[in-house]
């Protein structure tokens, strides 16, 4: 048997109760009008049928010209504000994560979000890996372009690559998600867990005996179009 096991956790509305990308963008821009304009562009494109990979890329154009250091600093400030409120972390999911850690399993966060949002989350829970969208950075500044997107099937691709690198056997690994778009990730491992009541995942959980965790409790700020843009 492999000595390495990995537990993959989706982040938004699985490990935490909000969509980090949009919560952070509102905080970072600190301008309701600019935020509404950015949100409107993304939702209108999603409603028009623009592929989710493209809407995900459009999001990162909001950071063009900004320094990596300033965005990361705002990420830490955003996280400090969010983690101070009750319910930011889903307690039952965190307990599951801690159980895996106690058993020596590596923890990987998998998200269409980016490191400015995810690194503080990873630091708090002690994650070993962050598999996420990687915006292009040149000379310390975001260009507005994206090198890699990790949404939908991209989550499974990133997870398989990590399992190959670490020598972990997929049948011995774990994955957790809350939305139908997480299904490729959950099917990429031998042990899956569903957070919440997504009908697609619930059906698979019932037929396959997957772990069921508490219903997620989104903050209410997101729409299905924003989901389309970020997963």
Image (cartoon, grey):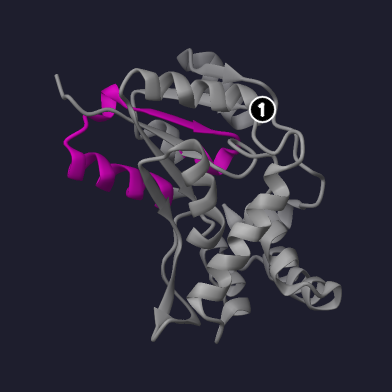
Residue carrying label 1:
196
Q: In the displayed structure, would residue 213 be above or below residue 59?
A: above
Q: Main secondary structure of the magenta part?
A: helix
Residue 219 x, y percent position in the rendering? 79, 43
Residue 27 x, y percent position in the rendering? 73, 64
Which stretch appears magenta?
154-183
Q: Quadrant of residue 134?
A: bottom left
Q: Mark yes or no: residue 229 visible.
A: no
Q: Quadrant of residue 54?
A: bottom right
Compared across the picture, whether 147 is left or right of 59 comes to left
Residue 171 x, y percent position in the rendering? 27, 24
Residue 11 x, y percent position in the rendering? 55, 43
Q: Nearer the viewer, residue 212 or 199?
A: 212
At horizontal 76% and vertical 34% (from top left) the residue drawn is: 86
Q: Mark yes or no: residue 7 visible.
A: yes
Compared across the picture, whether 157 is left or right of 45 comes to left
At horizontal 68% and vertical 26% (from top left) the residue drawn is: 197
Q: In the displayed structure, would residue 184 be above or below residue 37?
A: above
> Judging from the image, what secondary structure is the residue with disc 1 in?
loop
- Residue 167 forms part of the magenta stretch: yes
At horizontal 70% and vertical 31% (from top left) the residue drawn is: 216
Looking at the rendering, in which quadrant would you find the N terminus?
A: top left
- Residue 33 forms part of the magenta stretch: no
How many labels sit on residues? 1
Q: In the displayed structure, would residue 207 be above or below residue 65?
A: above
């Amino acid at each position: 048997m492999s000595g390495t096991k990995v537990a993959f956790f989706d982040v938004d509305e699985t490990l935490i109760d909000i969509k980090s990308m949009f919560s952070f963008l509102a905080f970072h821009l600190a301008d309701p009008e600019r935020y509404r304009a950015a949100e409107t562009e993304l939702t209108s494109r999603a409603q028009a049928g623009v592929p989710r990979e493209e809407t995900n890329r459009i999001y990162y154009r909001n950071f063009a010209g900004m320094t990596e250091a300033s965005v990361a600093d705002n990420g830490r400030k955003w996280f400090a504000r969010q983690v101070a409120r009750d319910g930011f972390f889903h307690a039952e999911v965190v307990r599951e994560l801690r159980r895996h850690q106690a058993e020596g399993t590596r923890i990987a966060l998998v998200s269409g979000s980016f490191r400015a949002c995810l690194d503080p989350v990873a630091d708090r829970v002690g994650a070993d890996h962050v598999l996420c969208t990687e915006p292009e950075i040149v000379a310390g500044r975001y260009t507005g372009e994206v090198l890699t997107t990790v949404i939908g099937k991209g989550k499974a691709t990133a997870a398989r690559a990590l399992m190959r690198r670490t020598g972990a056997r997929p049948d011995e690994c774990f994955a957790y998600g809350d939305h139908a778009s997480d299904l490729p990730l959950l099917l990429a491992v031998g042990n899956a867990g569903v957070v919440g009541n997504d009908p697609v995942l619930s059906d698979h959980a019932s037929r396959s005996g997957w772990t069921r965790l508490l219903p997620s409790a989104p903050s209410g700020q997101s729409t299905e179009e924003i989901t389309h843009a970020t997963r």
